[in-house]
Amino acid sequence: MKEFIIAALMMLTSAGVMAGDRLGGYGGIGLSTAYIEYDGIDVNDGAAGISAHGGYRYNEYLAVEGSLGVFDYKDWVWGPIYSAGISVMPMLPISENLDGFLSFDYSVSGSDDYIGNIGDGFGVGIGLMHHFGDMYVRGSIGTTLEEEVTVLGLGVDIGWHF
């Protein structure tokens, strides 16, 4: 019995060390696809996007992140859509190398040829992040909370802790 308790304590301690190694700054790049409906117009035409993100993980349960992205919609008459956002991300360690997360986002979007903003507002998401030492891969799905623009997005990111 004593050996079991010692082994369990060693496992718990090593998991805590791994989680602690992931605190601090991180950043990466990602690819995404989205279904978008703007003011009742369906522009779901094979939308694709690329983004960069950077953030800071304060503890094993909370991170704050900023992102920049560009998205190309073939039938969108005003050209590519550019976006910038900030997210508060509650994290839940699931195992030694796997975290679940929520994201509560605010973003602004626009296009070169469109006068005004496109889809500024709040959104929510959920995802999983798997860690490989200093590197991570994550997948997420999210949606906007605005009436004028409906976006349902799916993304995959790769990044590094520094």
Image (tube, rainbow, N blue to C red):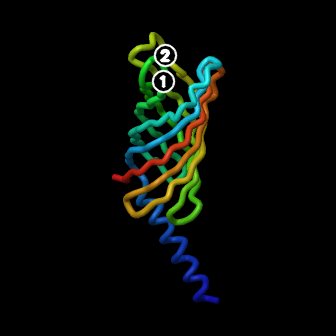
Badge number at residue 117? 2
**Residue 157 position within the rendered picture, expressed as x and y whole percent measured from the top left:** 45, 48
First reached walking from the N terminus: tag 1 or tag 2:
1
The residue tagged with tag 1: helix, strand or loop?
A: strand
Q: Which residue is mark 1?
A: 108
Q: Is residue 96 above or below residue 56?
A: below
**Which residue is pictured at 42% across the width and 35% down the height?**
67
Badge number at residue 81? none
Mark 1 closeness class: few <14, some 14–19, many ≥20 residues within 10 Å? some
Quadrant assignment, res 39: top right
Q: Is residue 104 above or below residue 82?
A: below
CA distance separating discs 1 and 2: 7 Å
**Residue 84 position within the rendered picture, expressed as x and y whole percent measured from the top left:** 43, 29
Badges 1 and 2: C-beta atoms under 8 Å apart?
yes
**Residue 122 position within the rendered picture, expressed as x and y whole percent measured from the top left:** 58, 28
**Which residue is pictured at 51% across the width and 44% down the height?**
155
| Numbered label tally | 2
Identify the amino acid type marked 1: Val
Identify the amino acid type marked 2: Asn
**Looking at the rendering, in which quadrant would you find the N terminus?**
bottom right
**Which residue is pictured at 53% across the width and 21% down the height?**
120
